[in-house]
Amino acid sequence: MTKAIKLLTALPPPQRGRLMGLAREVSFAEDTRIFEAGGTADRFWVIRSGAVSLTQQVTPHQRVTVAGLGAGDLLGWSWLFPPYRWDFGAEAFSPVRAYEFDAASVLRLCEEEPQLGVILVRTVAEILAHRLETTRGKLLEQYTTRRRGTL
């Protein structure tokens, strides 16, 4: 399995500095819904402290947690890809402090500095690949556990 990638530590210092020039510090109280699946993805966050649950609505009255994120983790990637809608929901599992980035401003910076854009997109892709690999492992584990229970 690949190693978890942290967005800010993966960026070289000059690119990290330019990106951080766009950051705004925010906080979310425990149990705050940060965004909902289907909503407009116009920003993203890097968690400084606390925990966030990524959730999927499975019935009108039931959400399941599909991943947990913590300090250093990227929250939100749908801002990079049309139709710019959240694929999951996110909820603060504990009090959260984060850096918030306006997607339009970051995309403009990436156009102005293509090297930063390439590094940023590559890093986000590595983060997504790791999360997909982790999810795949959890699904396989769940499948084999259920299968053993039916034998």
Image (cartoon, rainbow, N blue to C red):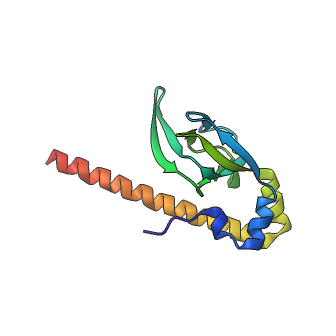
Image side of residue 125 versus residue 18, left or right: left
- Residue lying farthest right? 112
Q: Position of residue 78 (x, y in %)?
A: 65, 50
Point 67% across, 65% down: residue: 121
Residue 46 figure quarter: bottom right
Relative to the observer, which residue lies in front, 43 or 97? 97
Q: Position of residue 124 (x, y in %)?
A: 62, 62
Point 64% across, 67% down: residue: 9
Total tally of numbered discs in the picture: 0
Inspect this view and state whether residue 102 appears. Answer: no
Relative vertical location of residue 134 with respect to residue 29 in this rendering, above or below: below
Image side of residue 58 versus residue 144, left or right: right
Relative to the observer, which residue lies in front, 28 or 103? 28
Image side of residue 27 versus residue 18, left or right: left
Relative vertical location of residue 77 with respect to residue 6 in this rendering, above or below: above
Inspect this view and state whether residue 71 appears. Answer: yes
Q: Position of residue 45 (x, y in %)?
A: 67, 50
Relative to the observer, which residue lies in front, 81 or 134? 134
